[in-house]
Amino acid sequence: MKFFSPIFYITLFIPIGALAAPTRLVDEAPVTITQLPDGTQLVDFGKVAFGNLRLTPAAGAAGEITLHLGEAMAKNRVDRKPPGSVRYSTVKITLNGSTPLIAAPTADSRNTKQPAAVLTPADWGVIAPFRWVEIEGWKGKLRPEQITRRSAFLTAWDDKAASFTCSDPLLNQIWDLCKYSIKATTFAGVYVDGDRERIPYEADAYLNQISHYASDSDIQIARDTFDHLMKSPTWPTEWASHLIFMAHADFMHTGDKVWLSSRYESLKSKLLLTRTRPDGLVLSNAKQVKRDDIVDWPQAERDGYVFTPINTVVNAFHLRTLHLMTEMAKALGNEPDATRYATLEEQAFSSFQKILFNPTTKTYRDGEGTDHSSQHANLFPLAFQLVPEEHRPAVTAFVLKRKMACSVYAAQYLLEGLFMNDASTEAISLITAANDRSWKHMVESGTTITWEAWDQKYKSNQDWNHAWGAAPANLLPRFLIGAAPLSPGWNRALIRPHPGALKSAEGKIPTPRGPIQILWKNDSTFKISVKLPPGISAKLELPATPASKGVTLDGKSTPATRSGSRWLVTQEVTGSATLEVK
């Protein structure tokens, strides 16, 4: 017997005090219930979520039942010996008539007992990620109203806040996977690194934050995570830089100077200025070279990176943080700091180019004292706009030659650099590549939340609920649809689509001023319709088709300047507008 039902929601609001941003338990019905030949009930909730179960037996029910809850399936049954940190629990419960019962997964001491773990409310009971449930010993048919998954999500989450579709069905599946991954991993009220530890990490948090902005309207969970990490930082060198990234991302998204100003001074501790030598470059000691300078994670994803005391990736992060601190100091009216950071950036940038760029290979070395050039030593400078214009084609070509030689974490920056350097077709191809280092592989695996690594063989203890693997949730709206804030708070937006070989795309992008809606079609001409909320004007930089001669705005010719592969529209638009490159 099978039962099919849409998921429905009954919300239960749980006060959680100072634990984290407000979260809630949502009642979710099963998608299917199948009675197996041996009488076992197999329940599928459609997607993995962090939660537990409420059972409502019939009157007179008695005896013990056994439940198997899991993230993975093996031979059409719940996988009872899953790999790595993939979750499985078994629970035994004694029925007592029609008395409702909570069936909670087994607690994991690593993510509930260690001091750094973020705890969920005690009155929820234990929660863990699962999709499938097998029930042994249940008498008769299991009806859908007798089993409910109580799933934990951010209270403010709005499924309708963002949308994305395009002419490639696979990219649509990838977007859905990544967007849901951001939603499902809000269960703790702050961004955590999945279920293995349930600890916030700075790099994870930043990637979570920018994908959350593209998927939903909430800003509080990112802020709560930032404050948590300022009090409880982690150890990698480059992870500290991500807190500066988080503060800058908040400011660009919200325009909130009050929030920024109250945290600005504490951000200075996240700069690496105590480690710089006279030429402005960051110097690593033996411990930092061996352990703290992370480059990528896990270690096997570093493309043969050669670690030296002057590390190119570390210094790329240093330069980027100086640039962002300069911007934030200016916004807050702190001209002395802005001047100081700009001067430090200028000095370090000059040294970076002189010492770390190899003019023979036209690529960046991994560090001072080695001529080895990894993808990482080049993808980060490309993403952080550190590569001089004359060297960008060569660096971009080198990065592309290495394909996806980095982890799901560094892929965020790899793809940013490619999109920003006229390699959108290639970036999309990497996202959808027919190998095990792509999001196509994740989609085809059947997972419903993104992974910590590309595959189990690349990280044997990976968990299957890691939002840092959800980069397309932000990359597709920011680059493929093409919407990004041009000034703090989105009062001005930049709309710069990167269609690649796609024929069409449509998206709804959340902003604090309301959603931006964009639809474009890429054929013999490039046509785009934009709908902006009140208070936003948009600068448009549109793809220049090979034979194009200009741009029309609502059917009439409008001034635009050809710059390389783009038409830069002179007039900023407000409200609703349709433009066409002809």
Image (cartoon, rainbow, N blue to C red):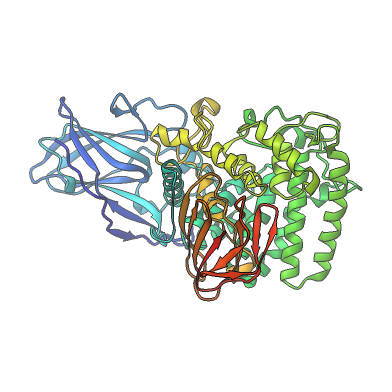
- Which residue sits furthest bottom? 534
Q: Residue 553: where, in percent of width, then height?
A: 55, 69
Q: Residue 250: where, in percent of width, then height?
A: 60, 62
For the point 83% across and 41% down, which residue is it? 283
Asked whether residue 293 is in view, the answer is no
Q: Residue 371 sits in which quadrant? A: top right
Q: Residue 404: where, in percent of width, then height?
A: 60, 33
The answer to whether 487 is drawn above or below residue 544 in the figure is below
Q: Residue 137 sits in which quadrant? A: top left
- Quarter of the picture holding the N terminus: top left
Pick whichever, 525 or 19, lies toward us: 525
- Which residue sits furthest right? 278
- Which residue sits furthest left? 60
The answer to whether 204 is drawn above or below residue 443 in the figure is below
Q: Residue 548: where, in percent of width, then height?
A: 61, 56
Pick whichever, 93 or 450, lies toward us: 450
